[in-house]
Amino acid sequence: MSISISEAAFELELQDFEAAKARIEADVIITPLLSYPTDDRNLLIKAECLQPLGSFKIRAGANAIAMVDKVKLINGVVTASAGNFGQGVTKAAKNRGLDVHVFVPDTASKSKVDSLINLGAKVTSVSFSDWWNIMMNRSAGVDGFFIHPVAELEVIIGNGVIGLEIAAQYPDVDVVVVPFGGGGMISGIALAMKALGKSPTIVACEIESSVPLSAAKNKGRPVQVERGESWIDGIGSTIVLNEMWPLLDALVDEVVIVSHEEAANALRALSNTSNLIAEGAGAVALAAALKPQYSGKNVVAIISGGNINKETHAHIMKGNDLFP
Amino acid sequence: MSISISEAAFELELQDFEAAKARIEADVIITPLLSYPTDDRNLLIKAECLQPLGSFKIRAGANAIAMVDKVKLINGVVTASAGNFGQGVTKAAKNRGLDVHVFVPDTASKSKVDSLINLGAKVTSVSFSDWWNIMMNRSAGVDGFFIHPVAELEVIIGNGVIGLEIAAQYPDVDVVVVPFGGGGMISGIALAMKALGKSPTIVACEIESSVPLSAAKNKGRPVQVERGESWIDGIGSTIVLNEMWPLLDALVDEVVIVSHEEAANALRALSNTSNLIAEGAGAVALAAALKPQYSGKNVVAIISGGNINKETHAHIMKGNDLFP
């Protein structure tokens, strides 16, 4: 009876994204595009780490909760999130007096879990595979309306507002580099820019320890990949969701894999050069945007958030590349 | 023959600030006002640490150099700056192919001096008292056109653009909290807001180790004060400049003194809550804005810059209040 999320997303029009922009205006800021000094390209970083709650995910969280039919929310809201999206949903839900139950993988950073609890969420920590099953099944087996952190049309639309902002702030952009977690952000940005008639090269970036999108692009379909150790959370799943694959197949032009050394260098540069605390996924985007193939281009890198464990950040700032 | 800087500044009109806004548009960003979570006031921080070169001083530097008659610049530019203003002047001058000679006090942080050298300035380090004499005499005894980092009308006008931005971004602001270095920023902001017909409470903040403005306000005239040890540079001189006093006497409504413990707490909060690296003077502004007397108000605090020695920052992030 229902069409897939990908099918619905391909039908989105400019007015859908503009309506979302208006809907979340009070919840978010228009993040600045900051010039990042390089010798050979125009590189601008979109500082989503300056959003309320420190992440772009407030956009989707606020949009998702604002679009759900109120009757469905009578038992509260349930979501599965490594933290940032859960925070956005929690804040938006608490503003409406709703209960929130967030399932997080036991790999989620303590700072993210603490933030959820401070915002008033009930938090349940589960193994990464159990958490991934919740994502796949769209159910955690508890009461409440489930909001999927990636594969919801409302999430894609909310994230698309980033694309509208980039187009307005930097009309000559050639390349947009986006951290790949589940695909909600990169799909939204690409669709919104297409709706505006823009067609920059859309680049997804992954950390070397788990590269599900690179693998899917190579095979032409989602395939299971290893998930190695990393200090970087929020990106790096074990497989691309089937329901997101048609979008990613069509919308993502290139995938760049970043090493931990490059990510650590970028994390330090964001603090030392741009005075920003970024999370690992944001550092991965800067590292990808600095790759030689984008020399001479007008590049925007999305610094997705700043919710990093402070000890991890301090450790890397001291010059360490890998967290033990 | 010439009128004083204070007299000239009192004559400034809205069009002077708007002309400066247009003149420096390509050199600066409109910094975001970011919501800072508190229970009892609406507190917004103006993140000047996100400017190119990491400080508000690019505004005045760019405006000053853009307004000087070209014939006067034949032997280059000389300035005396703890770093941030010197950087702004250097960048703007180098864009025009001019030599720059910057005199800095030997208390200036290494990161600031390194940045100046990287931008192409010749840097001479002198004792704090020699540096202060250069500021007072408006001459360093070397060739080149001297641009004063505080008491130049062009500087006050350039800084005034911050006031225009605040008025546009937050029309209901009640209180504006500004770090007090020499008075160039607070005077510019106050004059620009007055020119717009706005009259928020203008609050200067000082670090406890040197409080020249508090002393001047108490005595009704500039008086010499002790300059104690501090990890905070860029603010904390030993006396208010005579030529700035009439402006400060008239425009500054309140002066708040911040302790090193409060400043360290604010520095940590800016990183942990707002994902920003701030310099000490910016942390002093947040600490002042959190004082009980501003409960219930709409407050803007100017986070002046982010040019802090990285070891100092890391040391304070670990929970230390005072740098040895």
Image: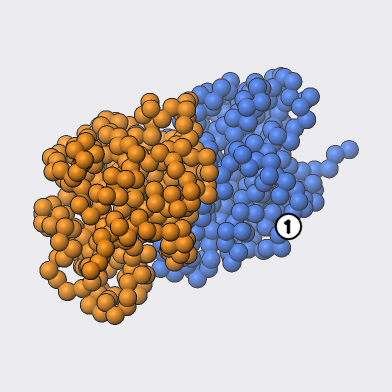
Chain colours: A blue, B orange
**Residue visible at 29% across and 80% down in the picture:** B71
Query: Hey, which residue is sitting farthest front in the picture?
Result: B1
Against B191, residue A147 (above or below) is above
Query: Hey, which residue is sitting farthest right in the picture?
Result: A1
Residue B172 falls left or right of residue A9: left
Q: Nearer the viewer, residue A3 or B60?
A: B60
Decide: few, some or many residues near mark 1? Use Cα within 10 Å; few <14, some 14-19, many ≥20.
many
The percent coordinates of residue A312 (x first, y second) are: 39, 37
Is residue A64 among the parts visible in the rendering? yes
**Residue visible at 50% across and 71% down in the picture:** A296
**Residue visible at 52% across and 36% down in the picture:** A53
The percent coordinates of residue B135 (x first, y second) are: 18, 58
The image quadrant of residue A256 is bottom right
**Which residue position is annotated with label 1?**
A195
Against A133, residue A11 (above or below) is below
In the picture, which quadrant includes the N terminus of chain A? top right
In the picture, which quadrant includes the C terminus of chain A? top left
Count of numbered marks: 1
The percent coordinates of residue B209 (x first, y second) are: 19, 37
The percent coordinates of residue A126 (x first, y second) are: 57, 25
Is residue A275 among the parts visible in the rendering? no
Residue A236 falls left or right of residue B65: right
* Chain of the residue where label 1 is placed in the rendered structure: A
Could you tell me the amino acid type at mark 1? Answer: Ala
**Residue visible at 38% across and 31% down in the picture:** B290
